[in-house]
Amino acid sequence: MRDRSMFVFVALGCVVGGAAQEPKPKPDLLFGGCGGVYLLAEPGELRIDVFKRDKNRRRRHTDLRAILVGPDRHVLQEATLPDDGRSDRLGPLQSMRLSTRVARKGVFALNITVSQDRYGEAMVWGFRTNCRRYLVETARGHKDERHTEPIVLYGTGGPATVCFLPRRGKFDLDVSGLAHDAPALRIVDAKGELVRKVVPEHGRAACTVPADVHRDAVPWCLELPSNRATVTIDGVTQWAKGDPYPDLCVWTPDPASWFALLPNWWLLIPYNTTAYARAGTEGSVSFHLHNNSRREKSVGLSLEFPGSSWPVHLSRDRVKLAPGASSTVVVRFTAPRELADVHVRATPEGASGFTTYSTLTVRAGAPPKLTVPMKLQPYRHENALLSYRPAYPTENQPYFDQKNRPFIVSGSRLHARRDGRWMTKELPGSSLTTKVAFDRKNGVYLIARVRGRASLLHSADGGRTFATYPIPGRSGTFDIEQFSGHNGSDGPPPFVRFTRTATDPKRIWRRINDLELFVPRRVDGHIEIGEPILITRACIGLSSHSGIPSSIVSRGPKVHVVWGEATDPKKRVPGVPTYAITYDRVTKRLGTRSLIGYGPPANDVHNSPSITMDSEGYLHVLIGTHGQPFQYSKSKAPNDAGAGWTRPVAAGKKLRQTYIGFVCGKDDTLYVVYRLWRTGAPYRYGYHATLAFQRKRPGKPWEPPKILVVAPFSEYSIFYHRLTIDRSGRLFVSKDYWSTYWFYRNDLPGRRGQWRALLMSADGGDTFGLAADSDFAG
C-alpha cells in the first residue's frame, strides 16, 4: 500500500495512545461532523494517521476516541487524542497512528467519537491512509428532528472535491459559505465529463439536477473552488422516502478512492460470532446475506482458515439475491479440541473487486456466564462476549399467559411456545404495541392495524386463530393492560388511546393529546369494543419505546388509569402533573381524578408514569421524569384511585432516571428498570448511559440502584428496555443498545433489535443472567 496525499479532517473527538507527531505535509482539508471511514484494504500493512485540532469555542473537554476494526468487527486498535487544554483559540495539530497487518482483503472501519461533542462541532479531525480505496461516512450523533448530515468543509484555502453517488431521480444541491467572488462550481461524472456548472451568488451556489440527466458514469464529483464550504445534496446528506441508501452520508474527497460499498452494505451478517461446543460434536451457525442494491446480485461464498483447516462446511457456495432481498447460509462444523477460527468470505459478482468476510470462532466447553454490571464493548455485545445465540425469539419482550407460556409479538408475527417449541403465527395485521394481554380465561389479545384500521385482536385458542374487532373513531397510540404482577381482567382487557391534537413548535416535547379509555366486553361469544370514554384533552402523551410503562391496571369491576398532562408554559409548575382515575364497569362511571404529584421537567412527554397493583389491591405509581429521580406514591385504599395517595417520595437521591419499566412481585416487592445517566468511570469525561435496576420491598425504602449494563460509548445512548414478569414471579429484562452515533447504528441493518438480549432473574433481582432456552420449558 502506498501513502495517499489527501488528508481528511472532521469536527469531533476521540482517544489514542503513543507520542503525537506533527504530520508532514500539513493537511489542507478539514471537514465537520462525526463518523468515520470505511477502507477496502488489500493484504499488507494498513496505516491510518488520525489528526485533531480543538476549536476551543466552548468549555468542553473533547477527547477524540478512534477505534480501528476489521471486516469481522474485531477491534484491532483503540487510541485517544486528548483535549489540548486550551480555552480561547484554535489548538495545535495533534496526531497519532493506528496500524494493523492485513492478512486478507476486506472492509475495515475507523470509528471516530468525541467526548462532550456528539455533533462534532467543537473540534476538527482528519486522517491519512496508505489504503487506496476508502469512503467517508459523515455520521454525527442524532438529533430529535429530521436526520441531516451536511458536509462541512473547513479547509485553509485551495480547491476541494466532494465525490458522491447521485440519486436516480431529481435532486437539489446547495453549497453555502463560499467567498462572495467565488467562480463557478463544476459537477462532473466519473469520466470527467461536465454534468452541470453552478454559478454562485453572494457566496451561495444552488441547482436542481433533473432525473433525465444520465447516471451512466458514477460517482459524480462536485468540484469546489474553495475547501471552506457547507454542502447539502438530496439523497446524500438528507433523504426522502424511496431513496436507496437512507441515512448513509457516504462520500470521498478523492474520486480514485471510491469503491462499491453502498450496494454491498450489510452483505454478510453477523460480522463475527462465537459458538461453544464439546469437542467432536457437530454444530451449525447461520449467516445472513443481504442485497442492498436495486439489481439482482449473485454472491460467491468460500471458507478461509487463518491456521490449520478443520471440519467446516458451507450449505452452499453461491447465492442469488433479488434487489433488497436477504437469504441465509448455514455453516456446519465439528467442534475441535481447541479454539479454532474460520472466515466466511462473500464476493459479489461484478463488484469491481469488492469482497469481505465474517469470522466464526468455535470454542470447546460452555460459554461464560453474564455478570453484572456488564460493560458492553464497541462491536462486542452479548452475542460476541457471551456467545448469546438463543433459540427463542429476541425481537421483543415476552408476556406470559395464565399457564405461564410465553408470547412475543413482532410486527405482524406472534411467537408462542407450544408443545416444547416455538411456533410463529402470521397476524391479520401489524401490531401497534409490543404488549400481549390475557384475560382470566386465557384469551390472547393484541392491538394491530388491520386493513388500515386499528383493531383489537382476540384469540380463544392460544394464538392459533384470531378474530378482529375494529376500534371505533380515530387512530392514535394505544396501550393495553398487560400482566404486571397482581392485576388482570375477567373479560377483554381495557385499553387506552392517545390521539395527538396539538404540538408546540417552541417546545418539541410538549404534546397535547386526547386520552380515551376503552372497556370492551364479551357479548354472545363476540366482543363489543364500546364507545371511547374521554378522560382528558390535555394528556402529554405516552413515551413507550423504552420501559413501556403501564397506563392501566384492573381488578374485578375496577379499571385504573394513570397519565401525565401538558400545562400552560406561562405558568410555573414543578413538572408534568400526574393523575389517576378509576372507572367502574358496573356503574359505567368515572370516579374523581386524583393529582398524585409532578414529574420534572414540565411539558415533557418523556415523563410517562407507570402503575401496578399489589396482592392486596393497593395501587402503586412511579411518576415519570426526564433525567431526575422518579417519584413514588401508593394509593390509600385498595382498588381505588380516588381515595387519596401517599405523598410522593423520590426513588433515590440525585438519580438521573428516565423510562420506567415497573412490575410487582409475588411478595409485593416493587421492581423498576430504567436508563440511568452517570458520569466518571469507565469514561473520564462527559456522561454515559447505564441500564439500572431497583426494588422496594414492602414497608421498606427504595434500595440503591444496581447497574445491569454499561454502554460501550459515552454521550447519549438508549437501551429500548422492557421489564416483564411471569406468573411465577421471575423477572425478564429485554434490552437492546442504541448509540447516538449514526456510524455505529448504520453498521447493522434495521438498527434496532440486532443486539437485543433477554436477561432473567429468578430470585427477585439478587442475580441476573441471560435467559436460556430451558427457562421457557415449563
Image (spheres, helix red, strand yellow):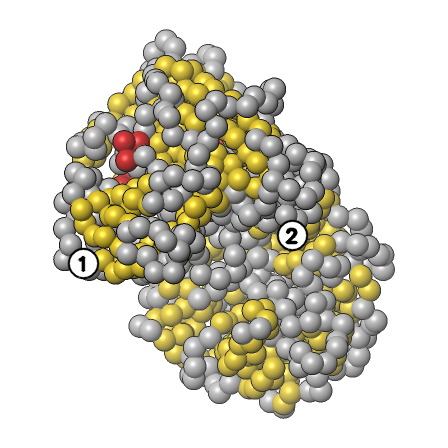
**Position of residue 56 in the picture relative to residue 344 (left or right):** right
Observer-nearest of 560 and 186: 186
Q: Residue at x 29, y 44 (%)?
A: 223
- Callout 1: SS: loop
- Tell me the residue that label 2 is attached to: 675
- Callout 2: SS: strand
**Image coordinates for residue 709, horizontal then vertical, percent:** 63, 41
Type of the residue with mark 2: Arg
Placement of the N terminus among the 4 image quadrants: top left
**Image coordinates for residue 309, horizontal then vertical, percent:** 34, 11
Determine which quarter of the picture holds residue 589: bottom right
- Tell me the residue that label 1 is attached to: 211
**Which of marks 2 and 1 precedes in the sequence?**
1
**Position of residue 312 in the picture relative to residue 95 (left or right):** left
Q: Which callout, 1 or 2, points to the residue nearer the camera?
A: 1
Work out whether 18 lies above or below 731: above
**Image coordinates for residue 259, horizontal then vertical, percent:** 28, 34
